[in-house]
Image (tube, helix red, strand yellow):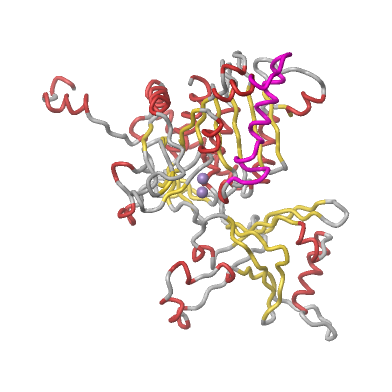
């Protein structure tokens, strides 16, 4: 082939940078692996529509794969040994896993950090009201949503009530085909003249996101709000709860539809909550599939990223640092603070989060030279932020070079991107919080179309490439 190339063609190949479509870069066998990996991914997504459900499903899988609770090791006064696999679950909503390597912790850890919360509609503490012979539930949306996308779609209820006596009851309705579903109504076009003149951000309001929950009255002339009473009665019969129990509950409404293939060639996955469960799942799978490693590998699956990572399940808390301190302490007989600090400083992390894939319907907001494309492999994002990189975690060139070489040497198809054009908007991930601790961090994950919509789309080859990229990072960086 190269014999027929002109001098200019040869130079071009040698000197210029070009991202490649990953489908063209993988073998037939790998195409097969890609499709079967994504079958398991879709199945996992369908069972993990909230952070609590993610933790629950992940726990089942990791325990089957030999992971044990780090707190059991602590309480039995044992130490960590090379090859051991441990985990901690925090408040049922976050989790951290580790596979112990042959190196001592002061040499640093290799980490992946993803988030397992997604935009959705949370119930307000006192949500139920009756109006025009129907019952509605008031919501407060969680994370950045375009509100108009959440009306007139089937919604499922997921969550947990903690009752007066301290016992809990879990609720999940709307996932089985035979289940009932819930929805938010919208105005018919015939009467929407005024609404349609409004800005899209105002056409549907936050206070207007009220979920239709029932319409059948309790048959008793002597009570008012008969439909509400009937609903309360049904809830009591089924779950043993009373209205006050909504005060101590976490109830989330999410799209009820299932993860499905998209495209005639079935090359993409469409599903709710792929930001960031596509990276969380691939990170989870990569740490599960690790064999012998030198540096201890850690996978942090955080809650609350979509609302700023605050709180005791979020990435701004000390939960990761505490876990690393436990790893250090359980790896030596002489734990000191400086051991923990050295461990963190020498650590390297991929902040496993999604990037906005270029959307040809809205090309104007992207810089094509610096955007991710669905199908071109795992995305490296050197910095996030907005308006002059404000609030960005900007990875050091030396670390970017390390990751780039690692991917090139291991046939990981990768691309780079920032999020949209300069001054078009922007966003952040958990990368900044770990970078502030002193470790090297870069954002790295899957390109997503329709991010934060009820039905987000990803490319299957990117999902598989991301799994492979994460795994090689844990093994070899
Ligand atoms: Mn995200
Ligand atoms: Mn997000």
Residue 287 located left or right of residue 415: right
Residue at figure coordinates x 48%, y 45% from the top left: 428
Q: Quadrant of residue 384?
A: top left
Screen quadrant of the N terminus: top left
Residue 352 located left or right of residue 57: left
Q: Position of residue 199 (x, y in %)?
A: 42, 71
Q: Position of residue 45 (x, y in %)?
A: 58, 45
Q: Quadrant of residue 330?
A: top right
Residue 167 located left or right of residue 54: right
Residue 311 located left or right of residue 443: right
Tell me where the magenta segment starts and ends, as one range: 309-338
Q: Position of residue 278 (x, y in %)?
A: 52, 41
User: Image height check: is 215 above or below 298?
Assistant: below
Quick check: is 326 in the magenta stretch?
Answer: yes
Which residue, as the protein is rendered here, is positioned at the far right? 165
Residue at figure coordinates x 61%, y 13% from the top left: 102
Q: Quadrant of residue 128?
A: bottom right
Quick check: is 388 in the magenta stretch?
Answer: no
């Amino acid at each position: 082939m190269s014999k027929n190339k002109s001098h200019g063609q040869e130079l071009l190949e040698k000197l210029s940078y070009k991202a490649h479509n990953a489908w063209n870069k993988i073998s037939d066998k790998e195409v097969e692996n890609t499709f079967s990996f994504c079958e398991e991914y879709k199945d996992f997504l369908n069972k993990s529509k909230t952070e609590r459900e993610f933790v629950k499903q992940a726990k089942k899988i990791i325990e089957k794969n030999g992971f044990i609770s780090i707190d059991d090791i602590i309480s039995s006064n044992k130490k960590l040994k090379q090859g051991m696999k441990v985990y901690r679950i925090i408040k049922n909503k976050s989790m951290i896993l580790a596979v112990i390597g042959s190196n001592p912790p002061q040499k640093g850890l290799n980490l992946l950090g993803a988030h397992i919360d997604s935009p959705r509609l949370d119930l307000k503490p006192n949500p139920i009201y009756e109006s025009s012979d129907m019952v509605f539930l008031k919501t407060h949306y969680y994370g950045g949503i375009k509100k108009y996308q959440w009306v007139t779609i089937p919604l499922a209820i997921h969550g947990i009530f903690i009752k007066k006596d301290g016992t809990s009851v879990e609720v999940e309705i709307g996932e089985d085909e035979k289940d009932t579903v819930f929805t938010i109504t919208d105005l018919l076009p015939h009467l929407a003249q005024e609404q349609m003149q409004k800005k899209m951000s105002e056409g549907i309001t936050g206070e207007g996101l009220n979920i239709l929950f029932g319409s059948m009255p309790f048959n008793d002339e002597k009570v008012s709000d008969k439909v509400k009473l009937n609903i309360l009665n049904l809830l009591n019969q089924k779950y043993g709860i009373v209205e006050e129990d909504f005060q101590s509950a976490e109830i989330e409404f999410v799209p009820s539809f299932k993860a499905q293939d998209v495209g005639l060639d079935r090359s993409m996955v469409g599903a709710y909550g792929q930001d960031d469960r596509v990276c969380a799942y691939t990170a989870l799978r990569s740490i599960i599939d690790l064999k012998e490693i030198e540096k201890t590998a850690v996978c942090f699956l955080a809650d609350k990223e979509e609302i700023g990572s605050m709180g005791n399940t979020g990435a701004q808390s000390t939960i990761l640092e505490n876990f690393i301190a436990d790893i250090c302490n359980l790896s030596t007989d002489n734990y000191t603070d400086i051991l923990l600090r050295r461990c963190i400083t020498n650590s390297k992390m991929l902040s496993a989060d999604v990037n906005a894939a270029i959307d040809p319907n809205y090309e104007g907001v992207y810089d094509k030279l610096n955007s991710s494309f669905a199908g071109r492999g795992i995305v490296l994002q050197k910095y996030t932020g907005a308006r002059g990189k404000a609030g960005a975690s900007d990875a050091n060139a030396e670390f970017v070079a390390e990751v780039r070489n690692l991917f090139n040497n291991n046939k990981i198809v990768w691309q780079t991107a920032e999020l949209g054009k300069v001054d078009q908007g922007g966003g952040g991930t958990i990368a900044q919080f770990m970078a502030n601790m002193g470790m090297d961090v870069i954002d790295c994950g899957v390109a997503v179309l329709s991010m934060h919509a009820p039905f987000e789309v990803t490319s299957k080859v990117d999902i598989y490439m991301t799994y492979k990229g994460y795994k090689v990072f844990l093994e070899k960086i």
